[in-house]
Amino acid sequence: MKIGIIGIGCITVDFANRASIAGYEVLISQIQNNRALSEVVETIGKNVKLVSIDEAVQAEIVILFVPREKIEFLMQQLPDMTEKIILHTNNKIFSLEPLKFNSGSRSSSEIIASFLPTAHVVTVYNVMQPMIIMPRRPDQNNNDIFYTAANKYIKEYVRIFLESLDFAGHDLAELYQFSALN
């Protein structure tokens, strides 16, 4: 299976490294200046290649780490993404309140979903305040990662994919329901 990554940050380098170790072919691209990534790509693993955005989005799963101000620019370059699984990674969550969907402002994931209405956009969080996760799992480790999506089948697919990368994936909707009960 191929994993496409557009944008490099700590989380996407971690995804690339884990995916390479797990045997996936990893296709990495950047919105601008792909040449600057050559050294990073060389250090990640043998299954990792530096490619164009067009090549990266052909993968079965596409992981995005794109600054909010560049989202529209990237979205206008993409081909038809119908049924594509998009993991959007650059949101940080410090409260479960945004999951109530009563905020007037749109998140980066909502903006991406509005450009890609026929794709499956899954938001992945790697930074959360301990008070959010401690009631659920007091034994947290460095492999924990959190995600949320609208489609239950896609969430299950992503959970299995995350496990294949040695992540412990946690569905935020379930976490929110659990915290609301306590």
Image (tube, rainbow, N blue to C red):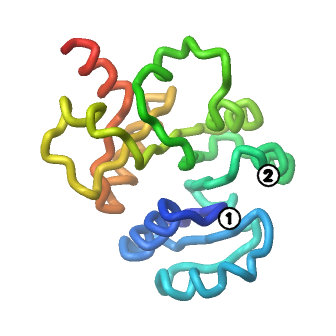
* Circle 1 residue: 56
- SS label for mark 1: helix
* Amino acid on which the number 2 mark rests in the picture: Leu
Mark 2 and mark 1: span between their CA atoms?
12 Å
Disc number at residue 74? Answer: 2
- Quarter of the image where one finds residue 7: bottom right
Give the percent coordinates (x, y) of residue 167.
Answer: 31, 55
Q: Nearer the viewer, mark 2 or mark 1?
A: 2
Residue 79: % across, % down: 81, 51
Residue appearing at x 39%, y 53% in the figure: 161
135 sits left or right of 127 in the view: left
In the displayed structure image, the side of residue 92 where residue 55 appears, left or right: right
* 108 lies above or below 39: above
Going by the numbered disc 1, the residue's amino acid type is Ala
Q: Is residue 78 above or below residue 25?
A: above
Residue 83, x across and y down, in percent: 63, 41
SS at mark 2 in the image: helix
Q: Which residue is painted at 63% across and 70% down in the image?
A: 28
* Residue neighbourhood size for the residue with mark 2, other residues' Cα within 10 Å, grouped as few (<14), some (14–19), many (≥20): some
Alpha-carbon neighbours of circle 1 within 10 Å: few (<14), some, or many (≥20)? many
User: In terms of sequence position, does the residue under pointer 2 or pointer 1 come before the other?
Assistant: 1
Residue 61 drawn above or below residue 30:
above
